[in-house]
Amino acid sequence: MTAATIIQSLASGLLMGLLYGLLAVGLALIFGLMDVTNFAHGEFLMLAMYLTFFLFMFWAVDPLLSIPLVAAGMFVFGAVIYLVIIRFAMRAKANIGMVQIFATFGLAILMRGLAQFFFTPDYRSIPASMLGGKTISIFGVFLPVPQLVGALISIAAFGALYFFMKKTDFGRALEATREDAGAVALVGIDKNKVFALGWGLGSALIGLAGGVMAIFFYIYPDVGASFALIAYVTVALGGFGSVFGAFAGGIIVGLVEATTAMILPPSLKSVGIYAVYLLVVFVRPRGLFGSI
Amino acid sequence: MTISRRNVLLGGAASAALLPLAKPARAQVKEVVIGVIYPLSGASAQIGVDAQKAFETAADIINKDYDFALPMAKGEGFTGLGGAKVRLVFADHQADPQKGRAEAERLITQEKVSAIVGTYQSAVAVTVSQICERYQIPFLSADNSSPSLHRRGLKYYFRAAPHDEMFSTAMFDFFDALKKKGQKIETLALFHEDTIFGTDSANAQIKLAADRGYKIVADIKYRANSPSLTAEVQQLKAANADVLMPSSYTTDGILLIKTMGELGYKAKNIVAQDAGFSEKALYDAVGDKIPGVISRGSFSLDLAAKRPMVGKINDMFKEKSGKDFNDYSSRQFMGLIVMADAINRAKSTDGEKIREALVATDMPGESTIMPWAKVKFDELGQNNNADPVLLQYNGGKFVTIFPPQAAVADAIWPMP
Amino acid sequence: MDSFTQRRRRDLILAAALAAIAACVPFFVKDVYVQNIMVLTLMYAALSQAWNILGGYCGQISLGHALYFGLGAYTTALLFTKFGVLPWFGMLGGGIISALIALALGYPTFRLRGHYFVIATIVIAEIGFLLFHNWDYAGAALGIDIPVRGDSWAKFQFTRSKLPFYYFALVFCCVAWFITWWLEDSKWGFWWRAVKDNPDAAESLGVVVFNSKMGAAAVSAFLTAIGGAFYAQFVSYIDPESVMTFQFSLLMALPAVLGGIGTLWGPVLGAVILIPMTELTRSFIGGSGRGVDLILYGAVIVVISLARPDGLIGLFSRRPASKGVPQ
């Protein structure tokens, strides 16, 4: 293995890592900061990818330009899902985590079924777009443009989320609501309103990821399954309650994956990611930067 | 009086014993029920849904009168069973061997199917064929290509189509032929998924490469439906073999080609083990990036020039599905025709009778829609005369380039 | 305490009555397809009961039980196909291996809380899956095809009849239920309730609770592996995709959650509703190829978990559903 291959692997790993971060940033808000389990995260991503695809197919909107539209659409979708489903799943008196897991697991299967019903199980993809297939080469290291843009969006999204959580009233309200819904009610904060907005925002972030993924990935009803577990591991590795943690988690996952693939057969490359997660939580039971 | 009556009774009993089912069957059978087990939901649903259309096309040809030189086309329904119609019962196995097994059992005991055709996933074919064996119902693998399937000593297992070893042999024959013409082919890179399909395919290719003196410079086994193939493609790029040989389904095939473009790797040549590389979806997505890609197959639309019915039947399928026949749908179509032909000759819906008829099958290649020499099963139930072809993707369509007797054009080598 | 004792006696009588009825059902139901559903229902009831010991009573939510299921299935199948060891010994061996692994994994993972623990169980099972998927000796992706040579109790294989499997699954289900019933009134059960009612008590009970949870993990893993061994014999073919995936882990937990997590009857009730529904929707609607079976299945799960967040068992209880754990 030459030095060039190693550098290329690490560069690609870093880009993939930022992309995993982007895939996980929505989950970092919903799962990591609001402490609500969403097992339909992958299916939200699937929906965002289909939205991008249909905007392209019917109105020839380039995926890059449709990202704000998709994010807006996903915002509404996320808020509605909270109000219609998640709100009730949070009423359980015991084992609230399990109820959330299974309500959202049911939602995931439902969404896959609906996608197959309405969109057919055919594999779709966007054949040509402004960024699709473009790549730049620096000293022989290839950096695909869609992933580069994805990485930039990822950094921007994490920055915005960090600012939002730390500097805005709403961010503080969100955190306070998670910690003690009863107490915030006393100061006039409506938990459902805050959480519905939180879900909308988290879903809009998934919309960003979906828009970027649609440029270079295939789309079909089960596509979310490929990403869901990596997104959960990314959030938990970074630690619950930490925006920066999920960001760092993504990068670590990307680099570990690239490194493992150099050592083990590529079919085992996820083993490296999982092993690193276990190692981290055995040493630090709250992930790298977690507070809860 | 009493004696003669007894004689009649005895005679009747004797003839009934000799021909247990033939008589009532001919008189009573109104329809022949055939079970079709495919993944109709879940990750492989697309294959199953297309398969439904292929089987419906075949059923249409069986049940109505068509002037094709194809068995079962002429006349309505099963002429050997007094014009009985075929009825298909579809079942969903969701790519789960246990569910496939349960569905096979349901089709046999509740729907009273006379035969079963399936299954796309080889793992499901294992359990479905086991159940068929237990109930003595013939099972025909329409599109499973795992070579291990017919080597399990099952009496009721049949496969009309080639398996991966036959497919891979065709590829290496093709390489040998090119080398004779002076092309340089020394190194191969295998890229295969970690499923039964990928493993079987790679094992066959590794063995053939060793036998025929090709060097495998990369053997990449990857996890199917991975979120990224970047690391895998880097290894392929570093190896830069003379021929890249992927065994991948549509999803990974699309991602492979896109990732190769992103990492600035242009394969010298690609010879694919079918699967994703025969799917329209892959060429819609990345076809422009891989002009000249070669895939093995068991079907080719350019056969229509020699056999006009191929084009007509393809049009019928296209009307239902919006797609041309590909390697899968053509094998599925042909699978049902082969099974129906056997039932027709058996003149019975009894499993053992159909099995005997299948064993006796000898269908000339010209009366199929495939480029096969003929359909004739060996003692393991495999048709060794199903010659695979190699197809080259060029100008938006596939052209048969190998073997010479089926080729309509010379291969463009190396890939443009 | 009196009402508790009374309730326990009532539960035992009810269980005996239900088991007796279940034992008679095959005399009236001859259809193998329906019998197949009944076998799966009992198997999932037992598996979910085993999961419930750790996930429900101890509150250690594991979504990685497919690991133990797979270990049970693989130990049995490998010992039989490679060494000719009868499946009954393989079943026991798989159970013991699983229990030991559960103990080894319990030591570091029980320190983790909440989501960290859940995700740890998922990735551990996923590592197991990937290793088996790439382990050539165990058939890797090809799996293991168990040769069936005719009906035999010694080899625990039956070509057509479902009845032996049905009765085994029934006994398995009863054993899992009885162990749960027995644990409820044991010292362990007492600690678990104490910890649940008052998390601070966990600190003061410390070591004993930790040890009891390790015990629960071992029992749960052992029973799950027995289920895996049974499945291998029942289907007579296993591959990593069909016995070790994450979906399987969810399917083991789902009946308990829908029926009533941490309750004696929840897993049985959940399995009786969920498994026939899964099978029937797939068989009779799945053939359309339009995903309607998934839509229905998903919708039912959503509706049940929203309408009855504490489990369907609440419908049968005179007391508030939240008191799922006996007081």
Image (cartoon, grey):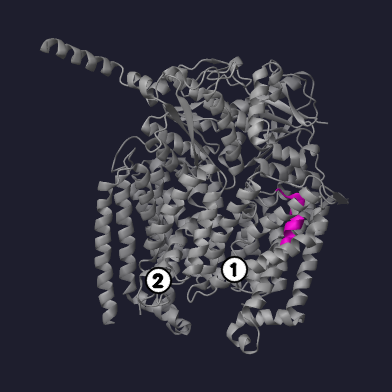
Span colored in magenta: A207-218
The numbered mark at residue C204 is none
Specify the amino acid type for callout 2. Gly
C94 left or right of A83 in image: left
Q: Position of residue C263 (x, y in %)?
A: 38, 70
Which is nearer the eye, B230 or A42? A42
Which is nearer the eye, C258 or B175? C258
Q: Chain of mark 2?
A: C
Image: B356 above or below A119: above
Image: A192 above or below C104: below
Image: B146 above or below C136: above
> Picture quarter containing residue C20?
bottom left
A204 left or right of B4 in image: right
Q: Which residue is mark 2?
A: C314
Q: Nearer the viewer, mark 2 or mark 1?
A: 1
Q: Which residue is mark 1?
A: A84
> Picture quarter containing residue A30?
bottom right
In the rendered image, the quadrant that contains the N terminus of chain B is top left
Q: Secondary structure at mark 1?
A: helix
Please say whether residue A216 is one of the residues in the magenta stretch.
Answer: yes
Q: Position of residue B59 (x, y in %)?
A: 53, 28
